[in-house]
């Protein structure tokens, strides 16, 4: 009977150890924050959203980010997916791009391999939203969190490929 209790105690301790190892601690003060992103009223899939603390925010405030799903829904994260954001006021940037080009160029003969810097980017949202200073979006997350953040982007999209090196349209 004594051996049974020893095995039971060791087994219980191991279970507690292994079950506790998979948990990622949440930073104290984070609250749930989620919402929807649309452009001209239509959901935007695959957009990156960054919440940057607004000037004058608490020194403890950190940036939070998210990626939108097929219905434009997002859940903010600070360290790990879905852990939330600190309460406070944020300036928001939104970006959805696709990069192409660049990479190795096959060489012929004894010439060394060259690399092309001919890279382009296509923006699928209006350019002004790429920067938190120009986006015009400021959102306050209350102390209890929120699941009703609504970001609706307006404006025309220019999908002309942009030269990444020169930051100019082709």
Image: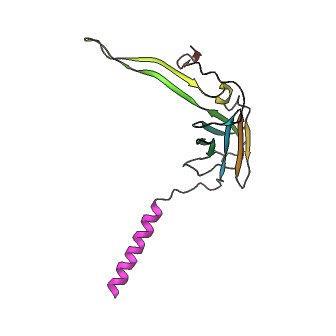
Q: Is residue 33 above or below residue 98?
A: below
* Front residue of this view, candidates 102 and 70: 70
Q: Residue 141: image x %, image y %?
A: 72, 48
Point out the image quarter for the N terminus.
bottom left
State yes or no: residue 16 in magenta: yes
Quadrant (top left/top right/bottom left/bottom right) for the C terminus: top right
State left or right for residue 22 relative to residue 155.
left
* Residue 33 image point, x, y percent: 66, 49
Farthest residue toward the left? 110
Residue 102 in percent (x, y) is at 44, 21
Q: Residue at x 60, y 42 (%)?
A: 66
* Res 109 → quadrant: top left
The residue shown at (60%, 22%) is: 159
List x then y, in percent, for residue 108: 28, 12
Magenta part of the protein: which range? 1-29
- Residue displayed at 51% across by 25% down: 99
Above or below, 133 relative to 19: above
Q: Main secondary structure of the magenta part?
A: helix
Q: Nearer the viewer, residue 131 or 101?
A: 101
> Looking at this view, is 74 or 65 the one in front?
74
């Amino acid at each position: 009977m004594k051996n049974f209790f020893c095995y039971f105690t060791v087994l219980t301790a191991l279970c507690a150890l292994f079950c506790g190892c998979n948990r990622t601690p949440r930073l104290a003060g984070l609250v749930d924050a989620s919402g929807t992103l649309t452009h001209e009223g239509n959901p935007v899939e695959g957009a990156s959203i960054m919440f940057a603390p607004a000037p004058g925010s608490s020194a403890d405030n950190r940036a939070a980010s998210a990626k939108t799903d097929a219905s434009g829904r997002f859940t903010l994260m600070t360290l790990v997916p879905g852990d939330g954001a600190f309460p406070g006021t944020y300036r928001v940037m939104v970006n959805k791009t696709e990069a192409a080009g660049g990479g190795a160029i096959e060489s012929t003969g004894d010439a060394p391999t060259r690399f092309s810097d001919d890279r382009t980017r296509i923006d699928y949202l209006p350019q002004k939203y790429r920067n938190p200073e120009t986006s015009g979006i400021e959102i306050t997350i209350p102390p209890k969190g929120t699941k009703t953040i609504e970001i609706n982007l307006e404006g025309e999209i220019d999908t002309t490929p942009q030269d990444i090196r020169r930051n100019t349209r082709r």
